[in-house]
Image: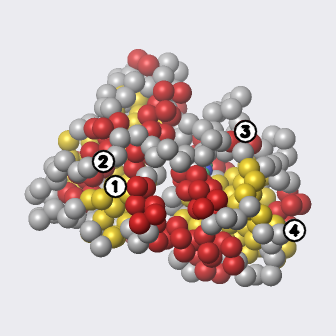
Amino acid sequence: MVPNALVDSMVGIRALNKIWMDGDLVDWDEAQIHVLSHGLHYGYAVFEGIRCHRTDRWSAVFRLPEHIERFVNSAKVYRMRLPFDADALNQGCVDLIRANGIPEAYLRPIAFSGYGEMGLDPTKSAVHVAIGMWEWPAYLGAENVERGVRATVSSWVRIDSRSLPPQAKCAANYANSALAKMEAVSGGYDEAILLNSAGMVAEGPGENIFRVKKGVVSTPPASSGILRGITRDSVIRIVRDEGIEFQRTDFTREELFTSDELFYAGTAAGITPIREVDGRPIGSGTYPITGHLRKIYEDAIHGRSPKYAAWLTPVPKASTASAEPAVKTEIRRGPVATRSRR
Ligand SMILES: Cc1ncc(COP(=O)(O)O)c(C=O)c1O
């Protein structure tokens, strides 16, 4: 096994105490799978990315039921029979945070076809479910949250639902994302913007995209071939609550360049402005609307906003990390009613 110290230096993951694996909290180093696991070979895995944040009640998970609902739906698209229901998965996330004693982290539920059979019919392999977590600062760089990132339009076209359904968060989709990301980074940019097969803007490799023009906020519709982001949904709700005009509409590559503001929105990246696309500075270099929306979003995720309290699943601290994981937390059943339609 690769020693943790080496892993830490390679990828920045700091080992924590526990991983939730098939219903049990197991020691971090024990959370292993066979190298011939089916999902590793064919990308047959669905996953989620969720964050918990420090609040005055210790920690809270942002929109946990919505993330778990998307996870269950991703599995359904892929005919993957999950051996755990949504309630058990919600509880697993809460138990894991308490067992690790870390209030601010990124959680990664993943379901995959395991060891036993090879070949392209995954239904012959048992489905396993794990939830890992690690400390992950702003994905596009803490310094870029204020000043914005430099983006490039990718030569890779976003997958679409005729090939790989983008609304199911399948590991295989991320080969497309990785190609775009590597191209952007090797060209000296921070992040990519993918167009869809019709040539319209779709999204980033791991984030949705928003445009601001003459005070109107817009984002591409689900039919543009995007993942329907939960941050995207939250931003749409905040935009409407703030009385800002909103449109769910396609936009072109050249409309990126002529935007007043552009920003990425996603669980990993949060709300991060885009300051430049392919050498064209975006707007005036200030992000008044993006900054306003980000402030409200940050208040919501950290439990400072009574208006959006229903988005949070509070997690009380365990008296001793790893010794006392199980607590029946009040977890909202099902998503909040405000979920935007598309
Ligand atoms: C391709 C893609 N688009 C958009 C998003 C943003 O989704 P969310 O806000 O639910 O994290 C993600 C992240 O999960 C993603 O991987």
Picture residue at 30% right of the left edge, 47% below the top: 331
Asked if 341 appears above or below 318 in the picture, the reply is: above
Q: CA distance from mark 4 to mark 3?
A: 23 Å
Cβ at disc 3 under 8 Å from ligand 1? no
Picture residue at 44% right of the left edge, 39% below the top: 69
Q: Badge 1: how crowded within 10 Å, few (<14), some, or many (20+)?
A: many
Label 1 vs label 4, nearer the camera: 1
- In this figure, which residue is indicated by the disc labeled 2? 331
Cβ at disc 2 under 8 Å from ligand 1? no
Q: CA distance from mark 1 to mark 4?
A: 39 Å
Q: CA distance from mark 2 to mark 4?
A: 43 Å
- Going from N to C along the chain, the mark reached first, 3 or 2, is 3
Cβ at disc 4 under 8 Å from ligand 1? no
Q: From the viewer's perspective, tell me whether residue 308 is left or right of residue 83.
A: right
Helix, strand or loop status at disc 2: loop
Q: Badge 4: how crowded within 10 Å, few (<14), some, or many (20+)?
A: some
- Going from N to C along the chain, the mark reached first, 2 or 4, is 4
Residue 276: mark in rendering: none
- In this figure, which residue is indicated by the disc labeled 3? 223
Helix, strand or loop status at disc 4: loop
Helix, strand or loop status at disc 1: strand
Label 1 vs label 3, nearer the camera: 1
- In this figure, which residue is indicated by the disc labeled 4? 258
Picture residue at 84% right of the left edge, 41% below the top: 198
Q: Are marks 1 and 2 in contact (CB under 8 Å)?
A: yes
- Going from N to C along the chain, the mark reached first, 1 or 2, is 1
- What's the amino acid at mark 4? Thr
Percent x, y for residue 196?
A: 78, 44
